[in-house]
Each structure stands twice: as C-alpha cells, then as structure tokens.
Amino acid sequence: MKHISSVLFVCMGNICRSPSAEAMFRAKASAAKLDIRIDSAGTIAYHQGNTPDKRSIAAGVKRGLNFSGMQARQVTQTDFSDFDLILAADEQNLQDLKRICPSEYQAKLALMLDFCAFGEQDAIYTEVPDPYYGEGDGFELVLDLLENSCNGLISRIQSGQL
C-alpha cells in the first residue's frame, strides 16, 4: 500500500461512529503533525445533511474533540478513488462498502478496529458498536475504541507500514 495521505471513516448513518472517528483521528493526526485529508460518510443517506448526534458531540467535546462543520453524507463512488484508506465501523458496513466498491479499490477497505493494540480484556471488540439506540456509556466506549485504533493507525503511518 502506498503512503497514506487520506482516510475516510464509514458507519451506517454518519452521525455517531464515523464522525467520532473523524474527529478523533483529526486530533491525533494534528498532534502528530501529519498532513492527512480526513472525512467521514455513511452507507445510507437517511441522515444526510444532519450534524453528528448530540450525544457523540457531548462525549467527544469532553475529550477535546472538534465536530464543527461536520454534516452527514453518503459514500459516493468517487470516495473509492479519492481516499487511500476507507475504514468501516463494523462488518455489515464493510460488506456494504465491498458490494459497491470497484474491484481495483477493494484493498483500501478495512475495519476501524483493525489498527487497535488490544489487551486480552479488549479482544472481544472487533467492531465499533453502534451506540445510537443505547443509553449510558456507549458513546464513551466508542471513543475508547476509536482512540486505541487511531493511535495504532498513526503509529503505522509514522513507521512507514502504511
């Protein structure tokens, strides 16, 4: 894979997990002084034009993340050529992306948590759980998982593995 200069984060509606991933990775990339184009999108257009979920924003702002200017959008065909890495929140969204992604870009697709450095207690998570219908700390768990994954992604980019 060539040097990563752009990353797209994808969940279903682009209002919880993927904008949280975008905000988290934007903060991590900035702190690491990496010049990377970062965006997020959804596999469906149901929330198109909406801002991220207020619960995602509240949890993220507590960690210093910035969601300003974000609006939900659906993945487009040009995203597959425009982004170097396209990370799905879960297996269902990854399968949806694989179904619409041209064959020459399939290698760009992966799961967000593929970059995590998990300990034994965390190994149960292979996907970012959707917090939308939940209550409590679901949004905090999403941010914990995304922080781990974004740290791993930054590390792999800096070490030249990506």
Image (cartoon, grey):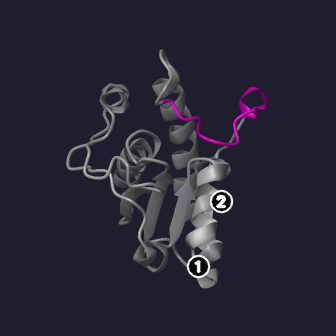
Please report the residue visible at 58 percent of the width from the left and 80 percent of the height from the top: 102
**Residue at 71% over, 30% down:** 122
Residue 52 vs residue 155: left or right? left
The residue identified by callout 2 is 95
Give residue 13's position: percent from left, percent from top.
Answer: 43, 47
Using the image as rendered, state which of residue 32 and residue 83 is in the foreground: 83
In this view, which residue lies farthest toward the top?
136
Note whether 162 is above or below 64 in the view shown: below
Q: Is residue 160 left or right of residue 45?
A: right
Residue at the image point whose x is 49% and y is 48% from the top: 12
Magenta part, dominant SS: loop
Q: Is residue 36 visible?
A: yes
Q: Is residue 158 visible?
A: no
Magenta range? 119-131
Residue 1, position in %: x, y? 62, 77
Rendering coords of residue 49 (x, y %): 25, 51
The answer to which of marks 2 and 1 sits earlier in the sequence is 2
Say which element carries label 2: helix
109 or 116: which is nearer to us?
A: 109
Is residue 4 positioned above or below 41 on the image?
Answer: below
Picture quadrant of residue 65: top left
The residue carrying mark 1 is 105
Q: Which amino acid is tagged 1?
A: Tyr
Instruction: Work out whether 153 lies above or below 133.
Output: below
State which quadrant residue 101 falls in: bottom right
Q: Residues within 10 Å of mark 2 (few under 14, many from 20)?
A: few
What amino acid is labelled 2 in the image?
Gln
